[in-house]
Amino acid sequence: MKHLLLFLSLLTSGHADPPRVRLLSASENSATIRVEKAASENRLTLLVDTLHTAGVHSFTFETTEPKVLKKLKRTWLDSGIKSITITSPQPSSSFPKIDPIEAHATLLRIKDQIDQATFQFEADRKALVSFIHQYGKPERDLTITPADLIAEKAAVQTQLDQFIAAAVDSRLQLATQISFPENPVTRHLKAHRKALLKKKALAATGVGPKHPALLALAEETTATRQLAIDDLASIEEALRLKIYQIDQRRKHLATWKNLPAADRATLKKSHQQKRSAYLTSLQKLRNLQSVKTTATRSLQ
C-alpha cells in the first residue's frame, strides 16, 4: 500500500502557531512525523503509541532536534515497533499550519483507499464463502459426526447471541475470549490497559489533573479503548462466518469423507489460500480504518 498523503495538524483548537508534532503521512503499515523544536514528548508519545496500536510498525521522523527522538527510540523498539528512521526535514514538508479544507480533502483520499481495500476484502470474502458453499470446510478429523457439528454450531450461536445482546463493556470482554487470528480487540485493549496503568502510576505521584503528561495519557486511554470498540464488528463477522462454515460442513461431510486423499489435499490447499487472502485483506482494511480514525481524532 502506497503512503496516503496526510498533512494533519495535531494542535488543539485555540492555538495559532503551527503544531510542533505533525503527522505528515500514514498508511496501514508506516507513518512519517514532523517533530519541531521544543516538541511535547507526551504529545509525540501519544501519537506514536496510538498509531502503533492501529497497526503501524514503521516510523520516519523528520526533525532538526533529534535528541528527544533518540531518547525514546529504544523504548519504542522494545514495544514492538519494527523500524524507526530519523532524518532531517524535507523542504517540501516545511509548510504552515494546514488549512481545514485541505485536511478534509486529505481524509477523503484516505476514504478512497479504504473503499479500495473494502472492494478487495469483499472479493476475497466472496471467494472463501463460495468455496465453503461448494465444498464445505476441509475436515482434519474424519471421525467427526453430524451430531458433533450440531453441538458445535449451538455453542457458537450461543456465543454470538450473548455477544450481540451484551453492553459495550461486556462485548469487549467477550471479544477477548473468542478465538480469532490476530484478535484486534485484544490488541487494542492490551494497549489500553498499559496506558491506564501508566496514568494511575503518574496520578499517584501527586501531579495535578492538568499536568501535560497526565492529559496525554488520558487521551491515549480514550483512543485505544475506542479503537477496540471500533473493531467489535469484526468479531461479530467472524462468529457469523464460523456458523456458516459449520452449516456447510454438515452439508458436505459425507462427500468430504469419501473423497480420495489426493483430492482432499488439493482442496485443503485451495481453502488455505482463499482463507489466507481473506484474512490478509481483512487485516489491511481494519488497519486502514484504525489509521483513519486516529488521524481524524488528531484534528480535534
Image (cartoon, rainbow, N blue to C red):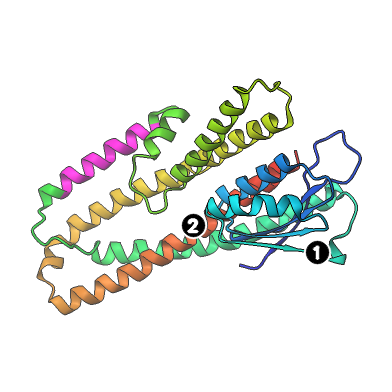
Q: Is residue 11 above or below residue 252?
A: above
284 or 255: which is nearer to us?
A: 284
Q: Quadrant of the N terminus?
A: bottom right
SS at badge 1: loop
Residue at 36% in and 70% down? 273
Q: Magenta span has 163? A: yes
Label 1: how many Cα within 10 Å (few below 14, some 14–19, many 20+): few
Q: Which residue is mark 2?
A: 283
Q: Position of residue 81 (x, y in %)?
A: 56, 56
Which region is colored magenta? 149-164
Which circle's residue, 2 or 1, is located before the other in the chain? 1
58 or 300: which is nearer to us?
A: 58
Quadrant in which residue 300 is drawn: top right
Counting labels gives 2
Q: Which residue is mark 1?
A: 88
**Farthest residue toward the bottom?**
262
